Image (cartoon, rainbow, N blue to C red):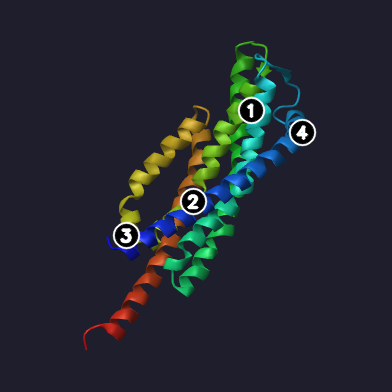
Amino acid sequence: MDMDDAMSLVEHLGELRKRIIWIIVVLIIGMVIGLIFAQPLITYLKQVPPADGISWNVFSPWDAIRMYMNFALVTGLIVTLPFALYQIWSFLKPGLRIEEQKASLMFVPFAFLLFLIGLAFAYFVVFKMAFLFTSSITEKLSLQETYGISQYFTFMFNILIPISLLFELPIVIMFLTKLRILNPKRLHTLRRYAYLLLVIVASMITPPDAVSAIVVSVPMILLYEFSVLLSGVVYRKQLLKDKAWEEEFGEK
């Protein structure tokens, strides 16, 4: 490696460091916003189904503080996600052509929108379904439902966060297709394994019954097929560009 390459590497690492610092700063700001809105948000979630009517308790002096911090962290992540995606795009921008810069910039709002859709699906469908299932088992056993607030919201976040991240699958597959690591043919070959993995994940985060697993598995499978479709769009554009390059610069 010559001196110019070494300087270039140092400059790239310095830029990456600056962008990571800015992401951390925005995360901290988002967590402060989360701390401010944690109390009204927790109060609201305690009053709406399926939490309404529950007798709330704490089993540790740290439970209330832990709830504040959990909500602050989740709020911080939601606030930071679009900014972090934009910073990643800005870091990769110099290595992209103009048309690629415009196309990849669209990934940022699209990824954030998918995250919000996943969050809504996880809360309004999967979490409520899982909670009602566990409550029905408790009722059958004639047990008194006395919940610790930390346990309740930990149970909720353990469902919400993984599903929200799973909804980023189309963006990940499009990005890997851009890098030519994946393509539609490979995704078609991996379909059966992907289906199996998604069904296993759905079974792990839902109540242990077939209906619940199907309700969650079907959207996950449709999401995978949507990802394959988007990968096909990206791949066809790559083939057209490769063909145009060969016609212009190939052997004559």
The structure residue drawn at horizontal position 69% and vertical position 22%, both measured from the top left corner, is: 64
Characterize the local packing of mark 4: few (<14), some (14-19) or many (20 or more) Cα atoms within 10 angstroms: few
Q: Which residue is mark 4?
A: 44
Label 4, secondary structure: give it.
helix
Characterize the local packing of mark 2: few (<14), some (14-19) or many (20 or more) Cα atoms within 10 angstroms: few
Say if 200 sits above or below 102 in the image.
above
Hey, which residue is sitting farthest bottom in the picture? Answer: 252
What amino acid does circle 1 point to?
Phe
| Residue 185 numbered mark, or none | 3
Asked whether residue 244 is in view, the answer is yes
Give the spatial CA distance, label 4 vs label 2: 39 Å
Give the mark toward the camera: 3 or 2: 2
What amino acid does circle 4 point to?
Tyr
In the rendered structure, the answer to whether residue 242 lies left or right of residue 14 reads left
Label 2, secondary structure: give it.
helix
Q: Which residue is mark 1?
A: 153
Give the mark toward the camera: 3 or 1: 1
In the rendered structure, the answer to whether residue 213 lies left or right of residue 113 reads left
